[in-house]
Image: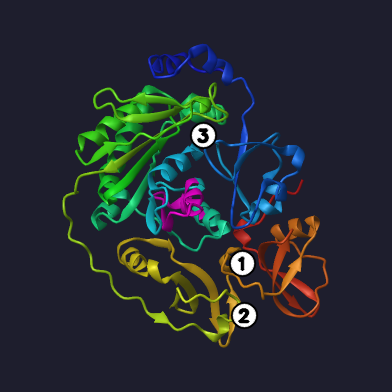
Amino acid sequence: MFLKEDFIQSLEGCEGFLRDEMMAAHQEAIPISVRLNPQKATGPENVFPVENTGDRVPWCPNAFYLNSRPSFTMDPLFHAGTYYVQEASSMFIHHLISNVFQDKRGLMALDLCAAPGGKTTLLSSMPHFRLVLANEIIQTRVPVLQENTIKWGAGHVFVSNNDPIDFEKMGAMFDLVLVDAPCSGSGLFRKDAAAMDEWNPGLVGFCSARQKRILASAMHAVLEGGYLLYSTCSYSREENEEILDHIMDSGLFESIAVDVPAAWNVVESLSKNKSAKGYRFYPNKVRGEGFFCTLFQKTGTSYSRSQHVAGKHELVKPLAVLEDWIIPSPQLRFFKKENELFAVDEINLPALLQFKDSLRLRKSGLRLGSEIRTDLIPDHELSMSSLLSENVPVLDLSYEEAIAFLRKDTIEKEGSGKGWCLARFKGIGLGWVKLVQGRVKNHYPMSWRILMRD
């Protein structure tokens, strides 16, 4: 792959940049890495053939490399949320977060620029967070974020569609705010050659200004003593180290350094004016793409905002209709929106009320389904959830049947009994079918169906 000369020249002097090695790395094959869902997969041997399972990603548990790229679209376990295909370098945020929070639990995280959901699902699998709010400002990117978070099956993930300034108005609420900022994307040129043609110094300047605007609001959403994690998939100093100085200039944060094993080949850099610590990833040094991240702890107090007093949610008592559908838990609270039933953990209810009154929520609690008289029409979200009862009837599918189900085709399989069943592949739920007079009715979401026919 050819790298433009003005791009290469713009990186001269960046910590760890080596021109010839960088050029050579862009001629090599792209590493393929995935991260397992600990709620659905106990190990890679349950998901991929042994011969295709490579080394583990050193800085992120449950993540490993594949020796070759399979067709993820044609893998039912991919659609079941058993794993997420994620670039290895970007998973380094797990190392940063686990180092500073260690054994702390019951925290709240905001993923401010969340689509398509890779970092959101990573946060939701960490034991530190009882609530993760995934926000995406661009409305057209919200559906894929919803889809990926629902497939992951974490009921403590909420999704919103708001401008960062709306979180500034809410005041400090979060123990961690992650800003994976929109950027010029130079770190992903090896994956997206067309992006190289779009790169220019003007784009870098535009992205830097946008990153500062986002951070101006994000900084005020962090609780005192909490952390701000900033990252990009860019190599440019204007989007990385210069942004670190901008954050330090606020007077609200101090730079945090964590121990990084030398064997990982992560390049540690310092900002020019404030010596804030950043971490650079180069494809000639790590098995991953270009990435940059940094961590700050909030030591100052943001200027005060008038806090909006959240209203009340109309809770309903646990309904008899749910007894056969979900694992009972005294911590669960239930509410209705028209005839739709939702469940939320009691500890997250105050936050949900605040979000409901201040944000455009697109996913609020676990959607269980629709109550029709004394019956429940189960929602697809319930089929993906860890709250689903083991007493729910199941229909196990072969590979060919699973692909037909995911295409929303008619499944040529006779089912015994009648009513709702969880369609499964290798013991993992794919969605709902309904048995009617020995026939199988496919209830997979139409907008998620596989379109590939080859």
Q: Residue 396 in the image: x percent, y percent? A: 76, 65
Tell me, yes or no, whether the two marked residues, 1 and 3, touch with CB atoms within 8 Å: no
The disc placed on residue 89 is 3
Amino acid beneath label 2: Asp
Image quarter of the C terminus:
top right
State the residue position of label 1.
Answer: 383
Q: Residue 376 in the image: x percent, y percent? A: 58, 80
Figure quadrant of residue 439:
bottom right
Marks 1 and 2, how far apart in space? 13 Å
State the residue position of label 2.
Answer: 324
Q: Residues within 10 Å of mark 3 (few under 14, many from 20)?
A: many
Q: Which secondary structure lies at badge 3?
A: helix
Amino acid beneath label 1: Ser
Residue 321 as seen in the image, left or right of residue 399:
left
Figure quadrant of residue 384:
bottom right
Viewer-closest of 381 and 452? 381
Residue 319 as seen in the image, left or right of residue 405:
left
Amino acid beneath label 3: Ser
Q: Which residues are magenta?
A: 119-143
Residue in view at x 49 percent, y 79 percent: 339
Mark toward the start of the polypeptide (1 vs 2): 2
Mark toward the start of the polypeptide (3 vs 2): 3
Q: Residue 405 in the image: x percent, y percent? A: 72, 61
